[in-house]
Amino acid sequence: MSSPLRLPPPDPRLSDFTGWTRAHWESVADHLLDSVVPYATDGFAQYRLPGRPSRSGTVSDGLEGFARTFLLAAFRIAGAGGDVPPALLERYAAGLVAGTDPAHPYAWQPLTDMSQPLVEAASIALALHETRPWLFDRLSPAQRERVVAWLAGFVGRRTPDNNWVLFQVVVEQFLAEVGGPHEPGEIAAGLERIEEWYVGDGWYSDGKGKNFDYYSGWAMHLYPSLWARMAGDTARARLYAERLSRFLEHYQHLFAADGGPVHQGRSLIYRFATVVPLWLGALTGASPLPPGRTRRIASGVLRHFVERGAPDERGLLTCGWYDAFPPGTQDYSGPASPYWASKAFLGLLLPPGHPAWTDAEEAAPVDLADQVVAMPQPGWLLHATRADGVVRLVNHGSDRDRVQDPAGPPDPHYLRLAYTSHTGPDIGEQAVDGQLAVVSPEGEPSRRRRIEPLAVGERFAASAYQDGRVRVVTASVVDGPAEIRIHQVTAPAGHQVRDGGHALAGPRPPEVSSGDAWALARRADGLTSVVRGLHGYTGAGVAGGHGVNAFGAHSATPYLIHDAHPGGTAVYVSLVLLTAEPEQLAPEVRVNGDEVTLRPPAGDPITVRLGPVPELTSPALGAPIGSPAAAQTTRSRDEQHRRTGREHRRPGAVRRQADLGRRRAAGGGTRGVDVG
């Protein structure tokens, strides 16, 4: 059993929002590192943590335990200039020696095509680079040769066609740095591959398709920037810095006032790794944020999880959000997978005198005022409220379409209409949250498996999906904490239409109530999920769940229904609300064919015209949002961003990229295969 986490006293003078300083980060890092020691194998080559093994098996999981905690140790060692307890250096030096000795009983697996150890090799390479004066350079020549030989197994290997291509880039760059075997063409091809996934305004898709999630930050931005730092490539460093700066202008909004990140996407067991782009911006000089804001947001996130049980009483990070939550864990994850959260400690590479550590904390956007942020590239519309600190993300674009099984169940972490910092989706076939489902008389609901993005703009976003004879076009208008959903449903007569609100979860069942066209669930802390039918609905209810939500054992989701769709096309309008404040008055709604007018209690009326591309008009706006002119402006800007990236390509890189793509294709694609 690890010793309890002991934190320094808060420093309200320097950090008046969180109280946390660099010393708090160092204390958490030390606690995490000390707590895994009891699970080390002889020689420290593997850390076999308790829990369900991944699909890669126990040996791979043990390597993962070494590699991911080694990255944390590296940030701690390098950040302290090597002035750390000698036992920390000795443990990881011993693990490197034992793991790369084929005769050792806990030797690491060789690097093979498409295998999980390829991921871990990247963490080891980065850690070796950062700690080279204190670890790699102090190994004997024979020991260094074995480490190089193991890493060199990456040369020529195939990877999934997503963020994994960057693992090869950083591993082979370290090999080049120490005079080991490497293939410059593979480094160049990996860097060029991600240019195809850059969509503008700082956003990358994680592979081909609409794969937008936290991997855009903790992988697609992180590895190229660290590679440029390793390689000394100033031209690419500038390119990546420009993109990161744009990205952070959006990304800073994804965190609640209490530090909770918006709960969207896969690998959420990495928790506070969500802060990686913030520290990366400070490390590279790319951040548009004041240094005090960077620390305020990052420290808020780490403190958020620490105060809610992550790490747990053993000092371990489990596969979950706060507590362990197996239903939300992908099968590629094992007991040590959560330690990709080690990336969060990238900020320790900043010297103690850096302004990100010494400036007073500055307010995050949600601390100052309500926020509405349109993110056209991922198809998101964010709205946050200062009064309760909640961030809500309306999803009209990200669906992981190239990975999802076209006939399988929709991934709840990508296909919901909305995600928030205070709620998570229910997992399972019975979940109703965040979905407009058309239910057949036999009880079979339509599924939103593929999102067709239509428009994103100020306070407005729209998309569509098709499932057999059912087509649903949804337009969202946000106002403070509320989302007004306008659904244009085309379906056979007699089908039920059901619209689900936010799933509210906690340790005890929420209080619930409902009426003719409204329903709510309220937690003991006052957070409330509400739905109100504004047009077309005939009933409402609350669906309960147990053990299906990462935020607590008991969940409740309010929903609206229309018992019998008339056939053909009809319009349904709902108000979906998540708030800890008193409920606001709903707007008046008038529906005239495919035109919906909303008249809020205060402010100008808003008109939404449904059609092939829904549009929003208001006296306060210029060109209608969703109009072809607005869309063309966005497309032109994005093409300029992609062209800038292409101008940085090296001679021959396009040919090498094509060759590498053919090699990857020869081993099969990644559709329907989830990889970390």
Image (cartoon, rainbow, N blue to C red):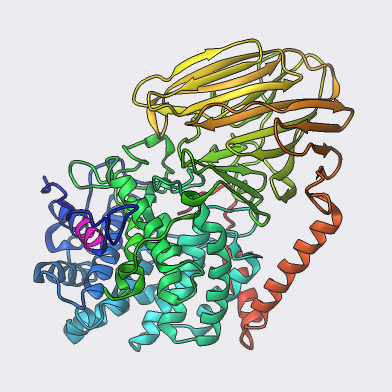
91 sits to left or right of 74: left
In the picture, which quadrant includes the C terminus?
bottom left
Residue found at x 28% / y 69%: 75
Vertical arrangement, residue 295 with respect to residue 368, above or below: below
In the picture, which quadrant includes the N terminus?
top left
410 sits to left or right of 622: left
Residue 110 appears in the picture as rendered: no
Looking at the picture, tell me which residue is in the foreground, 426 or 573.
Answer: 573
Magenta highlight range: 23-29
Quadrant hosting residue 355 = bottom left
Q: Residue 138: percent from the left, percent from the top?
A: 17, 83
Vertical arrangement, residue 390 with respect to residue 143, above or below: above
Q: Residue 311: percent from the left, percent from the top?
A: 25, 46
598 sits to left or right of 56: right
559 inside magenta stretch: no
Q: Residue 436: percent from the left, percent from the top?
A: 67, 29
Looking at the picture, tell me which residue is in the foreground, 92 or 567.
Answer: 567
212 sits to left or right of 487: left
Quadrant hosting residue 568 = top right
Looking at the picture, tell me which residue is in the foreground, 551 or 534.
Answer: 534
Mostly what secondary structure, the magenta segment?
helix
